[in-house]
Amino acid sequence: MCGIVGLFTKSTEIEESLGRHLGTMLEQMSDRGPDSAGVAVYRDPAPSGSSKLTLFSADPLQDWEALGGELGQTFGGLPEPEVRSSHAVFVVEAEAHDADAWVRQTHPELRVMSAGQTIEIYKETGRPEEFVRRFALEDFHGTHALGHTRMATESKVTTEGSHPFSTGLDLCLVHNGSLSNHNRLREKLRREGIDFQTENDTEVAAGYLAWRLREGASLEEALEGCFDDLDGFYTFLVGTIDGFAVLRDPIACKPAVLAETDDWVAMGSEWRAISVLPGASEARAWEPAPGIVYAWERQKV
Amino acid sequence: MSAAAEATGAEVVDLAVTPLRELNQRLHAVARDGGPAHWRIVNPNGAHAVAAGLDAEIEVEVDGHVGYYCAGMNKLATVRVHGNASTGLAENIMSGRVLVHGNASQSAAATGRGGLVVVHGDASARCGISMKGVDIVVRGSVGHLSAFMAQTGRLVVCGDAGDALGDSIYEARLYVRGDVGSLGADCIQKELRDEHRAELAKLLAAAGLDHDPAGFRRYGSARRLYHFAAGNSAAY
């Protein structure tokens, strides 16, 4: 099953309360995905020349301070970890790509959940309500955010198998559905140098998008490529540094609702998720048609 | 009768405070024990199975958007939704009327056996899938694979129909006023004769619409697919 939520802010008020709304939306989708939950939040851009990493450690005794010291020694500065449960965010004085590569190389026991200027990805197994509390979602302000509640069908219930999946710097993907050609596509993408950490089908879709973008496709072209190259059912919500995009496969078995007011644009697997937002009853609401990319972007400054 | 009911003449149930199961149990009890003939449900907020399984001649108004399977298995009752309906509106409706003033999501009136379902906005994919006697009138458009394997009943679409309309259709009759994206396997356009115009006029009137029946086209089964052809026996 799985539940998807997304919130794109159009007012300062919603920006300041982004995490609280995101948490409420996620809880509404708890029945659709009771085994894991995750969010991607776009907030507090790292200063120019620096980048942000969100890291996950399975070790409850992980010494994040020591890792900050290592990052400082390698790249300069004094990166302080902002720890939330099993995750920590570092602002590193390096390009995101270099910082990401260093962690993968030097600390294979850690997982890079996200890398970029503004993105932070948090995900864990367990009930969504518990996730919302454990990761203190109500603290987050930010420009936009995505969330997912998982009911696993294709692979194991693990932190790594939860959504969102990073698809590149400041990019991520959440998915409701199942892909049937993921094994063969994973092998093809591995030969193209795309790294996979799980046997999960959605990670393959994320890897596919990362590969297409790396090869020069625009986000829209990469998404439209899904129609030809992915076999299966999907409603995708893709997060970018500027906004998000929604895509449903042409058969469109998996649900999606979009709604918009002067203050926000929201996406949910069901209306229940959106109904909790301020002004929802007056929102313009519609079902995205299959096979069409819907995208919202903040105006670039 | 509650104070709220006295003011409007209807029994008011607020789903923000009343659990859904309690609401449905109260609505079901009317068939057994009698009770209010008019109900108004407020704050549905996308809840699933609102007013599902009714079996009494009552009128239920719902103010707001409803979730999956609203008015599913309906018998006798009239359910009116002032908002949008999610997947499976009036699924397997037996009789009575279900009206939605907004849009309906996929599989509206799926497997319906009787009664009337009216959608004043659009209905999305698979509207009337496997319908078995229900009448469906959509004032807007319907999505792809509508009336898939439709057996009996009538589907009226005042707007457009998406791809693969009536795929693998049996004996349901389809009327479309706008464009059809494509016809599904074994579904063909058929002549709109006087008896069809007459039944269409009745259906439109029942839905409170005044479109001219002459502006519709009729579609139905070519009957090439569902008969076992002895000549093909080697292929089975």
Image: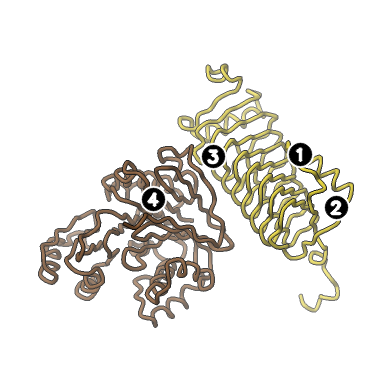
Which residue is depicted at the point 68% across and 61% down? Answer: B181
Whether residue A159 sits left or right of residue A44 in the image: it is right
Whether residue B220 is visible here, answered yes or no, is yes
Amino acid type of disc 4? Answer: Phe
Going from N to C along the chain, the mark reached first, 3 or 1, is 3
Which of labels 2 and 1 is toward the front? 1
Labelled disc at residue B192: 2
Residue type, label 2: Leu
Q: Is residue B147 left or right of residue B46?
A: right
Label whose residue precedes the other's in the sequence (2 or 1): 2
* Residue on which disc 3 sits: B65
User: Answer yes or no: do the residues labelled 3 and 4 have beta carbons within 8 Å?
Assistant: no
Q: CA distance from mark 3 to mark 2?
A: 36 Å
**Chain under disc 2:** B
The chain letter under disc 1 is B
Q: Amino acid at mark 3?
A: His
Q: Residue A150 at what x, y percent from top left?
A: 42, 56
Point 64% across, 48% down: residue: B108
Residue under label 4, please give it: A8
Q: Are marks 3 and 4 on the same chain?
A: no
Q: Determine which residue is flagged by label 1.
A: B210
At label 4, counting other C-alpha atoms closer than 10 Å, the crowd grade (few under 14, some 14-19, many 20 or more) is many
Helix, strand, or loop for circle 2?
loop
